[in-house]
Image (spheres, grey):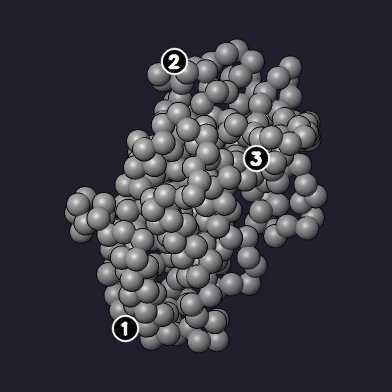
């Protein structure tokens, strides 16, 4: 489907598309009778639509910090994030899965995204990864509340434990998101995927991680190391992005700041109390050195 269709599909239209895609996914999961590659094409359309409406929001609301009531573009983003982060996860219970499909989705070692012919987990992870980069196009001054809730919804499925789907695409998402974050720091490239990722993970750095899932605990501590091991030296030396913008201005969300060797997060969507983010243990290793590849673009 081309650009014109994605622009004109509307809120009701995207709802109908998601309903049809859900039916195909449920059939695939319970019987394997729908080719994975066909579903991945549908997921790619959702992802492209999400990106188009992120750019639409950026064009329509440049310079604004609040959008109320939410525009149709925001409603479309909400429908897509609700589907990817929540509705999709509960389409089929584990005991309803076809055995061969379950094995394939949890073991298929491919990161081919929408091009995968064997796994829809690969396509789902790609939608989520691209969404973080696409949300970066909106700009950090535009309605942090709506952006934050979109981010939380995207991560819902991966935070949940013991869901067959989340087991299938969590590792693929983790690999994909860090391959997008690495060029932000190592090459000073955009889109600023890291800034969007920090909207939510930054807040978790202040909380007791023992109450979180194992995956989010590990990811939170990884972000802590990124801040203090990889970013702090660059911020101290006033390094700039490829376009001349200071790295700390480009890569930190509005709710975060760096000052005198410390990172801080302001709760209440950047309007509440500010708290210091604690440092990782001494001699903690670089996160970027663990990321073996980079993703350029979305």
In this figure, which residue is indicated by the disc labeled 2? 244
Residue 152 lies, in percent from the top left, at 58, 53
Specify the quadrant of the image occupied by residue 248. top right
**Residue 193: where, in percent of width, then height?**
48, 38
Instruction: Please report whichever mark, 2 or 3, sits nearer to the chain's N-terminal start.
Output: 2
Earlier sequence position, callout 1 versus callout 3: 1
Indicate the position of residue 240 as horizontal and vertical percent values. 49, 17
Looking at this rendering, what residue extends furthest in the front direction? 69
Q: Position of residue 220 (x, y in %)?
A: 67, 46
Foreground residue among 206 and 185: 206
Quadrant in which the N terminus appears:
bottom left
SS at circle 3 = helix
Badge 1 vs badge 3, beta-carbon distance below 8 Å: no
Q: CA distance from mark 1 to mark 2?
A: 52 Å
Please identify the quarter of the rendering in which residue 24 is found.
Answer: bottom left
From the image, tell me which residue sits under label 3.
269
């Amino acid at each position: 489907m081309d650009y014109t269709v994605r622009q004109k599909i509307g809120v009701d239209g995207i709802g109908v598309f998601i309903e049809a895609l859900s039916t195909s996914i449920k059939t695939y999961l319970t019987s394997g009778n729908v080719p994975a590659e066909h579903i991945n094409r549908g997921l790619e359309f959702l992802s492209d639509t999400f990106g188009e409406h992120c750019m639409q929001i950026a064009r329509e609301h440049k310079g604004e910090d609040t959008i109320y009531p939410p525009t149709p573009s925001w409603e479309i983003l909400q429908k897509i994030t609700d589907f990817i982060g929540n509705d999709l996860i509960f389409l089929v219970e584990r005991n309803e899965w076809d055995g061969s499909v379950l094995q394939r989705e949890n073991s298929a070692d491919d990161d081919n995204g929408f091009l995968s012919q064997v796994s829809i987990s690969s396509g789902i992870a790609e939608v989520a990864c691209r969404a973080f980069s696409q949300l970066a196009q909106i700009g950090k001054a535009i309605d942090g509340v709506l952006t934050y809730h979109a981010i939380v919804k995207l991560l819902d499925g991966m935070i949940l434990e013991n869901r067959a789907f989340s087991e299938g695409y969590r590792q693929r998402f983790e690999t994909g998101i860090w391959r997008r974050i690495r060029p932000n720091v190592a090459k000073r490239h955009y889109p600023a995927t890291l800034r969007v990722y920090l909207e939510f993970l930054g807040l978790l750095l202040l909380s007791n991680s023992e109450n979180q899932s194992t995956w989010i605990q590990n990811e939170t501590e990884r972000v802590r190391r990124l801040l203090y091991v990889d970013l702090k030296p660059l911020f101290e030396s006033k390094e700039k992005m490829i376009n001349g913008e200071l790295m700390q201005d480009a890569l930190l969300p509005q709710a975060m700041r760096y000052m005198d060797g410390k990172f801080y997060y302001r709760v209440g969507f950047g309007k509440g109390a500010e708290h210091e983010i604690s440092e990782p243990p001494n001699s903690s290793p670089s996160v970027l050195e663990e990321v073996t590849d980079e993703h350029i673009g979305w």
